[in-house]
Amino acid sequence: MPRKRHKPEEIVAKLRRVDVMTAQGTPLAEAIRSIGVSELTYHRWRNEFGGMKLDQVKRLKELELENSRLRKAVSDLTLDKLLLAEALRGN
């Protein structure tokens, strides 16, 4: 069975749903099962997204995307610099 990728908005909504259910007296394990994820996934999400609001999650994902793009640009420039330095040594 292929893994489902949840969007950050969906994760925040599911975490809130579990919070509401546990506040109403539903056991945590049952509330987690009702959102369709494992306990491990729930706790991982809680560590990453716990307490965040929807706009904060969107901003976090945007920053992570920008960070990965910038890392790639830096690595490309570093590679170019190393190639030029090697070519210069060859002359």
Image (spheres, rainbow, N blue to C red):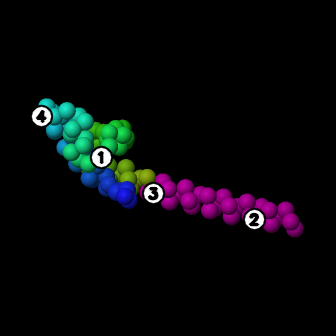
Label 4 belongs to which residue? 24
Label 2 belongs to which residue? 84
| Rendered residue at 32%/39% (across/down) | 39
Disc 3 to disc 2, C-alpha distance? 27 Å
**Callout in the foreground (1, 2):** 1
Disc 1 to disc 4, C-alpha distance? 20 Å
For marks 1 and 2 on the same chain, the one whose residue lies earlier in the sequence: 1
Asked if marks 3 and 1 touch (Cβ < 8 Å), the reply is no
Label 1 belongs to which residue? 37
Asked if marks 1 and 4 touch (Cβ < 8 Å), the reply is no
| Rendered residue at 16%/38% (across/down) | 21
Residue type for callout 1: Val
Disc 3 to disc 1, C-alpha distance? 29 Å
Q: How crowded is mark 2: few (under 14 residues within 10 Å), some or many (20 or more)?
A: few
Disc 3 to disc 4, C-alpha distance? 40 Å
| Rendered residue at 68%/64% (across/down) | 80
Q: Can residue 62 be seen in this view?
A: yes
Magenta-colored span: 65-91
Disc 1 to disc 2, C-alpha distance? 50 Å
Figure label count: 4
* Along the line of sight, the residue nearer the viewer: 3 or 72: 3
